[in-house]
Structures are given as C-alpha cells and as structure tokens.
Amino acid sequence: MKIRRRDLLKGIAASGLLVAAEQSPAQAKRARKDLPPNAVGILYDSTLCIGCKVCEYACKQANNMPVEHTSSKEVMWDDPQDLSAKTLNIIKRYGVEGPKDTVEGFAFIKRHCMHCLDPACVSACPASALVKNPENGVVTYNKKACIGCRYCQVACPYNIPKFEWDSPFPEIVKCQLCAHLLVKGGISACCAACPTGASLFGPVEKLRSEAKRRMAMEPGEYYDFPVANIDGTEVQQHRAGAYVQHIYGERELGGSQVLYLAGVPFASLGLPELPEDSYVALADGIQYAIYKGMVYPLVVLGGLIYIIRNREEKKE
C-alpha cells in the first residue's frame, strides 16, 4: 500500500502540533547549574598582569610538562605561542605598542581551562574520561578511561583540550587547576607564583565578590589587592585599572570557575562572545523535546498508523 506524500505530511504535522502543545521551548530548556558546594577557581586580572610568564614556568614545573621550542633558531628558551600538548597555561599579548590596557595599545590575557559549570567536554566524552568534581568543580582527566576519540576537543567552546599527536600513546592535555596540589591543601601553581596577584586563587563566590569590588574602584586610585590566594594574608597596593564593566566567565555558557577582568573588551583579547545558556543545556533541551521518554516518536508513529487505517477503511 502506498501513502500519499500529502497524507504523510499531514500526519507528521498533526503529531508535531501535539508535541508543540505539550512542550514549550521554556520548558524544554534545562535550568542553569549551580556552583558546586566548595567550588574553587581563578580570577585573572589583565590590568595587573605584567607579562612576565612566571605562571607558565610554574605550571610546567608543577605538572612536569616539557619545554617547547616554537622556533628552530631559538632553542634556549621555552617559548610556546599557544596552548598545546606541552603547554597547559599561557600568557598572550594583544597589541604591540601604545599604552597598556587600551584598545589603541596592548593588553595581556591568560588562557587555560575555564572549568565550566556545565562543561561541554564532560558531556561529550563517551568514556567518562573527563569528570567534573562534584565538590570543588574542577574538571579532571583520567587517561586510563580515555579512548582517544577527541570529542572533547570538538565540544569545547574555548578550544582548550589538546591532543598528543606526536606520542605513540597519546593523551588529552588540559589544565586541571593543579588538582594534585589541591588535595594536599595547596593552590594552583600559576597563582602561587604570580608576582602581582594578577592570577588569584580561591573560592569562586569570593572571587566573584572581589571582581565586583575591583570594578567599583576609582581608576587610577591605589587599593589593596590580595595576592596568590584570596583567603591568604598577602596583599599589594596597585592603581586600579579602568575596568570593562563585565566579569567574563560569570555568565558565559552558564558560567565558569575561571573569571576574567580586563581594561579592554574581551573580544579584543581573543575571548569569544558566547550566550548565557550552556550548549549542553540547549542540547539536552532539544533531545528532551524530541525523545522525551520516546513519547514523541510514538506520537509520530501513531499518526502514520491512523492514516493507514483510514485509507484501508475507505477501500473496504
């Protein structure tokens, strides 16, 4: 028996109306995820960064990472140009000449894993090799579980995970916030080494409050800035920068545990403009709307059966 195209479309359309009537877009979208109870992270203040790259050196020392020679002519220094399988954390400079922290001049930015509240890499990993710690929220990697599919690389909106292409037993490489130091009561090595407090470690709630305090400062006036650990006692006095009134990472894609402050628009520092809803939540909502308990495919099937029976009855 043949089904006319018009009847088929009618059946699917009728089923679709049932779906739409039952599930609104607002209902399909999953709620934002809250901070884990003991979430820790990093506040990077671009206006305090002097580009010394001590954080890069400390990161490699703490994580036993090899040096990287980008140029074959200069093999004396570790000189990575971007994140790679050998570099978990990097300071990049945007602009060359002119005043620091101005669009016409230059500014620094630090790049490493954002430790998203709703990480796409964790959701995309089919082997649970990437896991978000339910207590402190750090996204860690288990090389024993990894199957090398690299879905995490495709899923990450910040282009963070890297793959060891030149290794016979390759692994995914990314910042894990020095999780091995955290379990010993330490802090991330990049924050411990930063001489100006540009990279500040601590509970995310406190880092958010600190970022808002800095944005309310009078530019050019001196203030106390905590160094290394926001829960520590070390402070330095610096002139407050003319901050962009936005905490990057507070709301982007549902929020992250790494936050940024800067004196220039974040797009000028290579950070992508992103929506507030995480891609994982949006994807879950779409899947939920289409396959909610396999009800919707059954509705479509029911519409087709109705059409077939109706035509059979007319024949009789």
Image (tube, helix red, strand yellow):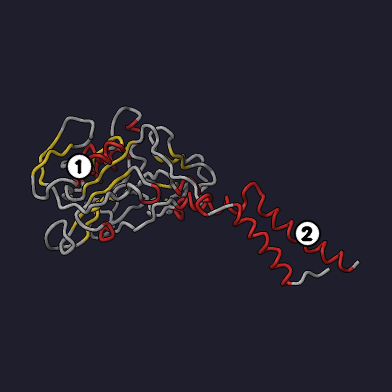
Is residue 284 visible to us here? no
Seen from the viewer's position, the closer of residues 138 and 63 is 138
Within-10-Å neighbours for mark 2: few <14, some 14–19, many 20+: few
Q: Position of residue 119 (x, y in %)?
A: 43, 46
- Three-letter code, disc 1: Arg
Residue at image coords 49%, 47%: 30
In percent of the image, x 20 and y 42: which residue is there? 213
- Residue at position x 31%, y 44% from top? 258
Mark 1 Cα within 10 Å, few/some/many (few <14, many 20+)?
few
- Using residue 278 as the reference point, say whether residue 193 is left or right of it: left
Indicate the quadrant containing the N terminus: top left, top right, bottom left or bottom right.
Answer: bottom right
Q: Is residue 8 left or right of residue 129?
A: right
Q: Give, as a three-letter code, the residue at label 2.
A: Ile
Q: Quadrant of the C terminus?
A: bottom right
Q: Which residue is mark 1?
A: 213
Determine whether the residue tagged by mark 2 lies in a helix, strand or loop. helix
Tell me the element at label 1.
helix
89 and 264: which one is in front? 264
* Vertical relation: 210 (above or below) 163: above
Badge 2 is on which residue?
305
State the mark number for residue 83: none
As measured in the structure, the alpha-carbon distance from the residue carrying label 2 to the one carrying label 1 is: 63 Å
State yes or no: discs 2 and 1 in contact (Cβ < 8 Å).
Answer: no
| Residue positioned 40% across, 54% down in the render | 157
- Residue 305 image offset from top left, x and y in percent: 78, 59
Q: Quadrant of residue 203?
A: top left
Q: Horizontal placement of 266 versus 29: left or right? A: left
Q: Earlier in the sequence, mark 2 or mark 1?
A: 1
Residue positioned most to the right: 316
**Foreground of the two, 152 or 311:** 311
The residue lying furthest to the top in this view is 184
The spot of residue 289 in percent (x, y) is 58, 52
